[in-house]
Amino acid sequence: MKKYQLYFYLLLAFALLNNCKEEMIGQYPTDNVAPQPVSKVVVDNLPGRSKISYQLPDEEDLLYVQALYDLPSGKNGVTKTSVFSNSMLVKGFGKSQKQTVQLISVDRSQNESTPLNVEIEPLDSPIYGIMDSLKVQEAFGGFKLSWPNFYKEDIVMGVLKKSGTTGEFSYIDNFYSSEALAQKSVRGLDSTKATFGIFVRDTYDNYTDTLVLSLKPYFEEEIPKSGFVGLKLSSRHAVEAYGGGLPSKMWDGITNVDNNLYYLKLSAAGQVGQIILPIFTFDMGVKAKLSRFRLWQRVNYLFALHNPKLFEWYGTNDATVANNAEDLNWQSNPAWVKLMSGESKRPSGLAAGSALTTEDTAYAKDGEEFEFPLDAPAVRYLRFKLISTWSGSSNLHINELTFWGQIEK
């Protein structure tokens, strides 16, 4: 008997479970009366989109207004706006052309009004203005791209290279960006003339035409880190043990590992009298005309804490001068030449302390790149001078450094 009771309760539970699954989610329909459509429609055409304003119908149970339209990609566009707004933005359009949008009122019983056809004519998508303003410049190991993006549109800048044997184009780089003023570099190319293609795409699969051009990058090579040697540190500065405590942590090839870095702070002597922010010097082992470098920040504190914000690089070929870490007036010595000033910047343009965007994080983890001026002389010894950190602290930490240029044989 107990066995049959068990089967009965199991079947009952199963039936109840099925009934729960079939229950309607949301409000049950209360009527089948269609609401009235919106009225007094006003269209404001914008780049790649249109703002549609309207007057809502006087319906107590009105839930939302939806717009149905076709996109150039062939996909169907749907935009829904609640009754707490009397306008909506329909977007995803490419080249300017007239479109028909259907506006439909929907009530809480899911009844739909008769569609109201509205004609829009969005302006050209921002991608075409970006393409028209694109600047391409040959550079060391590749070429530089820069463009304005006034609407901060999410775009992809695609870069292709033509094969010298098959004549076909293939992808060599993609840049995802929403920066108001973007500057990107294509690297890793040899110094032979080649044909490249560049286009812009948005998130709605609208494409510009492909710009085809021939470029010849300047020769550069990575400066071998095997020859890097850290030199004497000033008595005004001390090494923090966290991260390894060695300057060689900046050139061991390990990136984006939080406890692998060079961490400097003020020593007891450095906290007395004139405060001099951290400075360090190292020997590259070769004399080279530097073209660029990448700096990896401490990964757990990107664009924060003791990561450098403003800094300067100096160079010399005098070993005696390079090894003198106690000279407070070293910048007045003509043996030291200022090579460059650098500023770390977040692609998002957001202020220090604000949440990182996906673009900020990807940019920093790839190593922030800086270029040396073309007229910078060839040097063997480098000195880094901290001007300020992202938090305004008097400490400094750097995860990794990589340099490129032309080595003097």
Image (cartoon, rainbow, N blue to C red):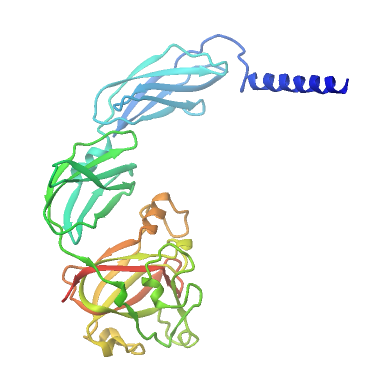
Name the quarter where the N terminus is drawn: top right
Residue 399 placement (x, y as % from top left): 41, 68
Taking the view exactly as shown, the residue that stands out farthest to the right is 1
Please give left or right for residue 11 compared with residue 107 in the image. Answer: right
Relative to 119, does residue 50 appear above or below in the rendering?
A: below
Please indicate whether residue 238 sits to the left or right of residue 372 in the image. Answer: right
List x then y, in percent, for residue 235: 43, 88
- 317 or 67: nearer the viewer: 317
Q: Position of residue 140 (x, y in %)?
A: 19, 62
Q: Quadrant of the C terminus?
A: bottom left
The reply, left or right, for residue 220 in relation to residue 284 is: left
Q: Position of residue 26 (x, y in %)?
A: 61, 22
Residue at x-position 23% and y-position 58%: 188
Q: Find residue 407 and report its image quarter.
A: bottom left
Please identify the quarter of the rendering in which residue 143 is found: bottom left
Q: Residue at x 17, y 58 (%)?
A: 190
Number of labels in the image equals 0
Residue at the spot 19% in from the left edge and 42% down from the top edge: 169
Between residues 314 and 56, which one lies in front from this camera angle? Answer: 314
From the viewer's side, name the closer residue of 115 and 242.
242
